[in-house]
Image (cartoon, rainbow, N blue to C red):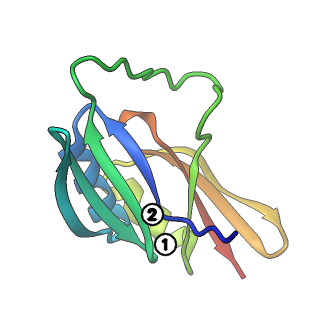
Amino acid sequence: MSWQYDHTHFKCSDYEKTVAFFKENFGAKEVARWENKGMPIVTVQIGGLSYNFSPRRPNEIVDSRTDSLHYGVYHIALKTADLVAEIAKMKQRGVKVTQDVGQANPKTKFAFIEGPDGISIELLQRD
């Protein structure tokens, strides 16, 4: 049996705002808008990977706590060639940096930002 990554799906308080955030900060390309059983879904791609964004349905309860660790998705990670420059641009746009640029090892720099609804995003530069 063979498996491949397909997508990660996020429930959002304002999915259009979240899509705009990913477009502005990561150059996400919108590739589809569709509905599944009345739920709108927007698909974007970043670096060849797909991410879906949609609002919660009226009968769904979405845990929006971001102040402590919880089971489930911990964060997503996106890689860039110049982390320091990208973080500077994001700071100018008012993006919340939760951990500034640090060195994980001699070849890897990292930082964390907070996206809409508290989505934790790790940013990496691997030399």
| SS assignment at label 1 | helix
Image location of residue 89, percent across then percent down: 38, 65
Q: Residue 88 got which mark? A: 2
Q: Closest to the observer: 127 or 94?
A: 127
Do the numbered discs 1 and 2 sit on residues whose CB atoms are within 8 Å? yes
- Residue at 27 percent across and 17 percent down: it is 59
The answer to which quarter of the image holds residue 81 is: bottom right
Disc 1 packing (10 Å; few <14; some 14–19; many ≥20)? few
Judged left or right of residue 14, residue 91 is right
Instruction: Say which quadrant the C terminus sits in.
Output: bottom right
Image location of residue 39, percent across then percent down: 19, 39
Q: Residue furthest right?
A: 106
- Residue at 17 percent across and 55 percent down: it is 34
Q: Is residue 103 shown above or below 9?
A: below
| Three-letter code, disc 1 | Ala
Q: Which residue is mark 1?
A: 85
Q: Is residue 61 shown above or below 3?
A: above
Q: Closest to the observer: 47 or 5?
A: 5
| Three-letter code, disc 2 | Ala
Instruction: Say which quadrant the N terminus sits in.
Output: bottom right
Judged left or right of residue 60, residue 48 is right
| SS assignment at label 2 | helix
- Residue at 62 percent across and 40 percent down: it is 74
Disc 2 packing (10 Å; few <14; some 14–19; many ≥20)? few
Q: Residue 50 got which mark? A: none
The answer to which quarter of the image holds residue 125 is: bottom right
Image location of residue 16, percent across then percent down: 18, 47
Image location of residue 106, percent across then percent down: 85, 73
Cα distance, mark 1 to mark 2?
A: 5 Å
